Image (cartoon, rainbow, N blue to C red):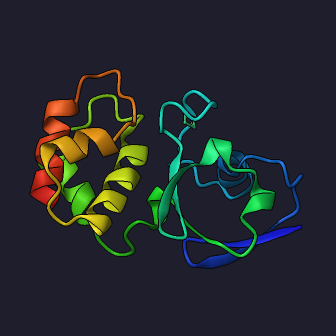
Amino acid sequence: MTRFTVNNQPIEYRLDPQTPLLWALRDASNLTGTKYGCGSGECGACTVDIDGVPRRSCQVPIGTIEGTFVTTIEGLSRDRSHPVQAALIASNVPQCGYCIPGIAMAAAALLRRDRAPSDEAIHETLSNLCRCGIQPRLVDAINRAA
Ligand code: FES
């Protein structure tokens, strides 16, 4: 049994400790906002926050995060849009939208560390992949959220 907190709720997972966090969230907790893209840590679609650090949940066995605090896109904001989510909408960023939850989690983490990141810092930090070509609008949205 592995215990950690997800979106402020303590949860006990009766899963193999090697189960990737991505699948514990999606299949056991029905938190399907966290997406599967590559399964190999490359694309960032599965990004969640673990103890304040953005991590690619497909690469995190749940047995390694006992006692941590996990935040998913569902928990990013409780009662209204997080400023990053509002800015993504205002800047018309999403196209197909599949990568957006992971990008929102990575962008929120970036803005916690740096309240006014340069465009270069945004490009360097947000290594999440998007096939729709949203990068120019994404930079605009993060500047708007900042
Ligand atoms: Fe985890 Fe692509 S699904 S990085």
Q: Position of residue 61 (x, y in %)?
A: 75, 51
* Residue at 14% over, 61% down: 116
Quadrant of image for the N terminus: bottom right
Q: Residue at x 25, y 58 (%)?
A: 84
65, 7: nearer the viewer: 65
Where residue 115 sits, quadrant-wise, is bottom left
Which residue corresponds to the image point at 31% horizontal and 53% vertical from the top-left? Answer: 107
Q: Quadrant of the C terminus?
A: bottom left
Q: Position of residue 6 (x, y in %)?
A: 61, 69
Q: Residue at x 12, y 49 (%)?
A: 90
How many marks on residues? 0
84 and 117: which one is in front? 117
On screen, residue 55 versus residue 142, left or right, reads right
Against 9, residue 104 (above or below) is above
Ligand 1: image quarter? top right
Residue 3 location in percent, x, y?
78, 72
Note whether residue 47 is visible.
yes
Is 86 on the left or on the right of 6, as rendered?
A: left
Spot occupied by residue 131 in the image (x, y as percentages of width and height): 35, 21
Residue 91 in view (yes/no): no
Given residues 100 and 112, the one toward you in this image is 112
